[in-house]
Image: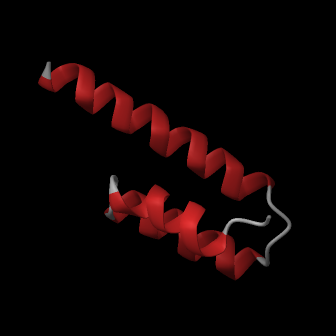
Amino acid sequence: MIRLLGILVLVLDVVVVLDIYRSNKDTEKKVLWILIVFFLPLLGPLLYYVVSRDR
């Protein structure tokens, strides 16, 4: 069960990083968001989609 949760978090992080990479944000903002996702694996993607995602 724990392994499945880890895999799901990893997949979520990869999807969010790809979304950040494809966005039309400045390079500095992209790097900052990728670092946030990397260091906060569960909270980072949530913050990105709530705060910064282009609508």
Q: Nearer the viewer, residue 48 or 25?
A: 48
Residue at position x 79%, y 78% from top?
A: 26
Figure check: 3 above or below 35? above
Q: Is residue 19 left or right of residue 31?
A: right
Q: Nearer the viewer, residue 34 or 8?
A: 8
The number of numbered discs placed on residues in the rendered structure image is: 0
> Looking at the image, is 21 positioned above or below residue 52?
above
- Quarter of the picture holding the C terminus: bottom right
Q: Is residue 32 above or below residue 15?
A: below
Q: Position of residue 23 (x, y in %)?
A: 80, 60
Q: Quadrant of residue 20?
A: bottom right
Q: Residue at x 19, y 22 (%)?
A: 3
Residue 12 position (above or below residue 53): above
- In-image side of 16 versus 3 (left or right): right
Percent position (x, y) of residue 33?
55, 70
Question: Which of the image's four quarters has the N terminus?
Answer: top left
Residue at the limit of the structure toward the left, as seen here: 2
Residue 47 position, x and y percent, is: 47, 68
**Colour approach in the figure:** secondary structure
State the residue at coordinates (69%, 65%). 53
Residue 42 shown left or right of residue 23 in the figure: left
Image coordinates of residue 54 in percent, x first then y, are 78, 66
Residue at 39% in and 36% down: 10
Left or right for 22, reference 44:
right
Res 2 quadrant in image: top left
